[in-house]
Amino acid sequence: MSNGNPSRRLSRLEVLLTVFLVAVIVLFVFLVSQFRQQRPEHARPAGNASTGPDARSAEFDPENDGGSRGENGTSAALASSEFSEKSLAIVLPDNGAATNLADAGLAGNSADGIAGRTSTNQAAKEAKRLTATAGDIQAELQRIAGLPWGPDTEKQLQTALAQWAATDPDAALAYAMNLESRRAGTAAVSSILNQWAQRDPAAAYEWFKQNLAGNPQMVSAALTGLFDKMAAVDPDMALRNVWQLPQDLRNRALQATVNQMIASGKQEQIMQYFNTLNDSSAQSMLATIFVNQWATYYPAETASWIASLTDPAVRYRATLTLISKWGYDNPAAAVDWVASLPRDQNWGAEVSRMMDVWAKDAPDKAADWLLTLFPASAQLDPAIQSLVNTVMNTNPEGAMMWSETITDTNKRYSLMQKVAAIWMKKDPERAAIYITNSDLPNSIKKKLFRMR
């Protein structure tokens, strides 16, 4: 039996080798299948991009991009992407069938996992709450790049950038700053900074300061929204930061801050901060903006606060602001307050401001009120001039009667000459009779008569 047929032993060896080879092939097929299942669809390179097994790694590997990550940690593929309102050509990986951000959040494996456990609507809501990864952002931007440019496409772009800004505002802002369309980029910068300021106003303002000089037009457009959100989160911070801004931006920032604080019922906090300012010009700026906003609904309370101001220059500027605001909204109430003001060196200008506001809409009522302040005086001259300048084109004869009440002789003759010239064009016969009998100097009379 030991000398059995050798061909029989060879057949067994063949069988063993065959089994081994089959096992190796099965294992290889299984591993390849597992690899393909685990690789996300959106990781495949775009049809118009580089192809091959190394295309994706060459595009996004930070070690292969020549140090292309910017100061804010944004990859060169994002920071230097081209943007066109016609093509939205962004050099990013293709995302295949990514969903619309506005409907279901950024595409990605996290949303897919949720969709397997919940309904479609629930998955969409949950996906919006998820932290979007850089790959999700890149994929969504690439999907948007394939869409025709229009309002809906821009809305999706802004939504994608907002999602990005939720986790990496520096990178989102760097990308927005490099958009080819300055209009779309400016809108994106403003939106992202507003969003950032709601979470971390100090960091958002720091970015604003650092980037303002490099791109003042685009960055300064975000100023109002930035300080509005900052004031909502930390009013003291907003008030402090206003004075760090260049002078040409302070007024807008302060107005946004004050408006937000008053809307939130924080006028007492503004008054307290006002009292800490040692600079008269800063107090005047703050008082003017504060009065203009607060007087919209509380003019009487605003007037009481103005009366408490100790700096005469600040009080005078605030008074003129209130006259303009209150005089337009409710002149009948405003004139009583103006009439009660101290008749100091500023009173004439204050009455004149009231006439500027009221005479444009109701010159007869304004004139009747002005008569209650007579007798004529040097303090009332500016108000009379204001009334005359307002009505002389429509009623030169009535304007001339008021011109005669100016107490300063030179100003009176100058104003009468101006009104007479208009009157001569409208009604030369009546104007000539008046000029002849007036106390105007002969030199002025001759000049006026040559106009006939």
Image: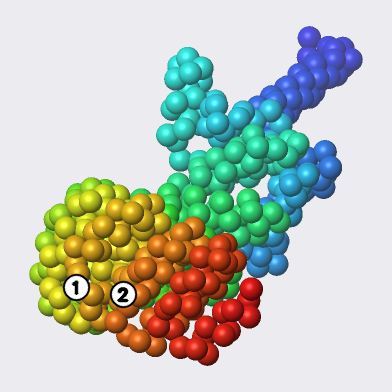
> Which quadrant would the C terminus be assigned to in this image?
bottom right
In the displayed structure, would residue 63 be above or below residue 243? above
122 and 82: which one is in front?
Answer: 82
Circle 1 is placed at which residue position?
375
Query: Could you give the CA–CA distance between mark 2 and mark 1, rounded to whole angstroms?
Result: 9 Å
In the picture, measured across the screen, residue 313 lies left or right of residue 61, that is: left
As helix, strand or loop, the secondary structure at mark 2 comes to loop
In the picture, measured across the screen, residue 265 lies left or right of residue 169, that is: left
Q: How many marks?
A: 2
User: Residue 64's spot in the image, x, y percent?
Assistant: 70, 61
The residue that appears at 35% across and 52% down in the rendered structure is 362
> Which quadrant would the N terminus be assigned to in this image?
top right
User: Residue 47's spot in the image, x, y percent?
Assistant: 82, 38
As helix, strand or loop, the secondary structure at mark 1 comes to loop
The residue that appears at 16% across and 58% down in the rendered structure is 336
Tag 2: Cα neighbours inside 10 Å, few (<14), some, or many (≥20)? some
Circle 2: residue type: Thr
382 and 338: which one is in front?
Answer: 382
436 and 132: which one is in front?
Answer: 436
The residue that appears at 75% across and 36% down in the rendered structure is 148
The residue that appears at 85% across and 15% down in the rendered structure is 11
**Quarter holding residue 383:** bottom left
Circle 1: residue type: Pro
221 and 204: which one is in front?
Answer: 221
Circle 2 is placed at which residue position?
405
In the displayed structure, would residue 120 be above or below residue 55? above
Examine the rendering and report whether any part of residue 146 can be seen: yes
